[in-house]
Image (cartoon, rainbow, N blue to C red):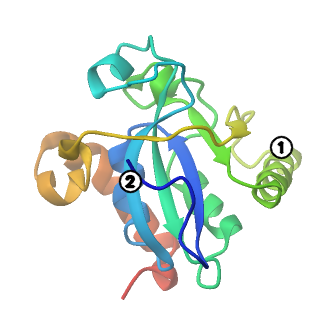
Amino acid sequence: MPPDTPPAGREFATLAGGCFWCLEAVFEELAGVDAVISGYTGGHDPEPDYERVCSGETGHAEAVRLTFDPSVVGYREILDVFFAIHDPTTPNRQGNDIGTQYRSAIHVHSAQQDATARTLLLEYAAQNTFGAPVVTELAPAGRFFPAEACHQRYFRSHSSQPYCQLVIAPKLARFRKLFAARRKP
């Protein structure tokens, strides 16, 4: 089980935006992100696992928890990347991944993160940034359950699989294009 508090000088960000493999692959390349853990959050099952979460009955979403250095990458920038790589306008769906476990959600760890996320969501609404209402949930961070070991660093280990090539690789390419200057060396 990962620690409940970040190391000194670091913060957590917990985000759900479809399959956790996609988010993990992108955020592993963002400068200032020290660690990315794929897992489950936002539900009621005290012992979620991949099979139960995929059933949609646990209330959990597939999510990632980032440990980041706010002196290198700000929370707003993390959210900018998050919104650039998933569709925040489709409730309980990302592409062909359908179900409550694929919902878009920001789980905040502080009042400052909450204020930043709320401000950004208001900006998106005022500018109609996505051409449709944003349905991203905003909630306090609750307990985070790491996914099984086979789901960690998934893209690195399975990049030639069809799902990785058809779904994850395009998101990585988009990130690399839009945020080239913010990638890890």
Farthest residue in the bottom direction?
185
Gap in Å between the C-alphas at discs 2 and 1?
A: 30 Å
Rendered position, 49 above or below 20: above
Front one among 8 and 119: 8
Occupied quadrant, residue 84 = bottom right
Left/right of residue 126 with respect to residue 103 in the rendered view: right
Q: Residue at x 43, y 80 (%)?
A: 183
Q: Look at label 2 and name its amino acid.
A: Ile
Q: Is residue 116 left or right of residue 24?
A: right
Give x and y (percent) for residue 169. Answer: 28, 55
Q: Quadrant of the C terminus?
A: bottom left
Which disc, if any, is residue 114? none
- Up-down: is 100 above or below 172? above
Q: Name the residue: 69% across, 44% down.
A: 130
Three-letter amino acid code at disc 1? Ala
Residue 131, image x, y percentages: 71, 40
The foreground one among 116 and 67 is 67
Image position of 73 with respect to 89: above or below: below
Dot 2: element: strand
Q: Which residue is mark 1?
A: 125
Q: Which circle, 2 or 1, is nearer the viewer?
A: 2
Q: Is residue 98 left or right of residue 14?
A: left
Q: Nearer the viewer, residue 89 or 145?
A: 145
Instruction: Answer few, some or many: residues within 10 Å of disc 2's Cα (few below 14, many 20 plus, some between 14 and 19).
Output: many
Q: Earlier in the sequence, mark 2 or mark 1?
A: 2
Where is residue 31? Give x, y as percent. 47, 79
* x then y, percent, for residue 100: 51, 20
Instruction: Answer whether labels 2 and 1 touch (C-beta < 8 Å).
Output: no
Mark 1: give few (<14), some (14-19) or many (20+) Cα within 10 Å. some
Q: Secondary structure at mark 1?
A: helix
The residue that disc 2 covers is 37
